[in-house]
Image (cartoon, rainbow, N blue to C red):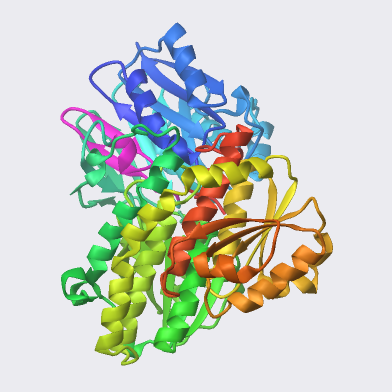
Amino acid sequence: MCGIIGILGKQDVAPLLLDGLKRLEYRGYDSAGVATVYQKHLGRLRAPGKLVHLEEKLAKTPLKGNVGIGHTRWATHGAPIERNAHPQMTDKVAVVHNGIIENFAELRDELIADGCVFESDTDTEVLAHLVTREIKGGLTPVEAMRVSLKRLRGAYAVALIFEGEEDLMIAARFGPPLAIGYGKGEMFVGSDAIALAPFTNRISYLEDGDWVVLTHNSATIYNSDDLVVERDISTSSGNEFLVSKSNHRHFMHKEMFEQPEVISHTLAHYLDLGNDKINENANPIDWKNVERLSFASCGTAYYSTLVARYWFEKLCGLIVENDVASEFRYREPPMTDKTLAMFVSQSGETADTLASLRYCRAKGVKTATVVNVLESTMGREADFVLPTLAGPEIGVASTKAFTCQLSALASVVLTAAKHRGTLDRAMETKLVRQLAELPRIITDVLKLDSDIEEICRDLMTVKNILYIGRGTSYPIALEGALKLKELSYIHAEGYAAGELKHGPIALIDETMPVIVVAPHDRWFDKTVSNLQEVAARGGRIILITDKEGANAAGINSLSTIVMPDVPEFIAPIVYAVPVQLIAYHTAVLLGTDVDQPRNLAKSVTVE
Ligand code: F6R
């Protein structure tokens, strides 16, 4: 959360900072700001709200200077108002920060007792004052930074520029990621390679505890013991990335419609589609020696692991545990030698998931990550990397990343089952063929776009919605509810259909729509019984099913979304799409900000 960028350039950097911030806006969009050094003096412009407000301000009052830093904020400490926007500044230094300085209250008290005057409610401002105090005490900026960093507890990626210094920037990382970009006579820092893509593709990543002193022509990296270290410079693929919605109204719409293509890329990585078998080269894991699979992830990624549990249990006979990472990391779960810990994440930076991965590594447990951003911290730290090839996902609500996670996990399940001897060749052929059909089937489902939009007109006025499902449709019900609430701000909850009568049914009346995810599978009849119970109490039902299910449901006065017939194995991947479309269209009809819903950020790097 929060995006930071810094540039030591050859021309005025403020417009370039803005360009980089546009690519980082997915990380937070409560407020934004830039600061530069021009003719030795620090200058700053900040604006609350979306980046466009900062852009307008900069157009009216351009900020000159060849060295500068920028920030787009997801508020942690202090309301999203200009005073709390970054850069935070004193007369000596300007700071941008992503993360949380946990001991900020005690540092603030100490600095106030020392005569510092605080202007914001942020934790970040303590770093500005700490460094300033040291500089005023006679230290150089580099020495001041070295001393100040030792005082911080918590998580940070920071970049600082200094009064009087037009060839200096210092950045540091503990927790949230920070990339260094190498240009010719120019240097860059950024929260990710995507932000730096317009400027350079030569990237290195700081490790935890690293800090770097940058000039236009050099980058000197120190580790947490203040020893000079080298970090590999790689060529990032970020340059291929274009921030464009094509002809779609929203990134989310574009990304939903990219699903057939990116699923097909993901499947092609894991499967030998020409020969209806798994691709052995894509399997880094010794599945025969795994007895227990332990998943920890967050949000939508967590729901992908709930689906995977059904597959791993049924096809591989594995013991599977699922946790939300924020609980897992503090529960101190016991780990056995034969546990494989698996972490699913689009960004590869989610603080709780990363902490869970590190917990397992510290316990000596092998870790695997199903990850979209391969250069991310999880991508670099896990023992085994299982990529999703969804491409950059800009819409804050995860769509194509989710179906790619499911596609990757389904493929990995087949590999695991084959290696464990629970999948014969005939079954392998059958299931690989089913997966191979996904791009075609999802293309057909996307044709329901305008029918689903019509159904959503009825949802605009409701206050609460329930989603129910059984088997692998249960996690899809959870995902549907999450997607709807985060985009439309309508309260929605997902339940296992069988749980309805244990409490939630009390909520049902004629004002409460219930969205039922129910392909005509082995759970269908049971789900229909639950659906009858809802109908008997006047609840409004939207049934997502196939032709057979629609005929068999036998209930009048319901809206039905009729899906293609699909085999049970791939059904959750296919049924993820209509729940995305429902959330999208309801939100668009209600006029919410679909790509950047309130209070959210794409990359959750604080816990
Ligand atoms: C919801 C959504 C979030 C993320 C969650 C984990 O639409 O996108 O729930 O799934 O924040 O993020 P990653 O996958 O980056 O670890």
Residue 244 lies, in percent from the top left, at 34, 33
Tell whether 577 sits left or right of 65: right
Residue 443 lies, in percent from the top left, at 36, 53
Instruction: Tell whether position 536 is magenta.
Output: no
Q: Quadrant of residue 569?
A: bottom left
Q: Quadrant of residue 358?
A: bottom left
Numbered-mark total: 0
Residue plotted at (64% across, 40% down): 457
Give the farthest residue toward the bottom.
Answer: 421
Toward the viewer: 21 or 579?
Answer: 579
Q: Quadrant of residue 440?
A: bottom left
Q: Report the span colored magenta.
A: 176-196
Residue plotted at (38% across, 87% down): 290
Residue 332 lies, in percent from the top left, at 57, 76
Residue 224: in sight, yes or no?
Answer: no
Toward the viewer: 560 or 449?
Answer: 560
Residue plotted at (36% across, 19% down): 14
Toward the viewer: 468 or 141?
Answer: 468
Residue 70 lies, in percent from the top left, at 42, 28
Instruction: Tell whether position 179 is magenta.
Output: yes
Tell whether 605 sits left or right of 198: right
Q: Quadrant of the C terminus?
A: bottom right
Residue plotted at (60% across, 32% down): 591
Residue 101 sits above or below residue 412 on the image: above
Give the farthest residue toward the top.
Answer: 60
Residue 332: in sight, yes or no?
Answer: yes
Residue 513 sits above or below residue 101 on the image: below
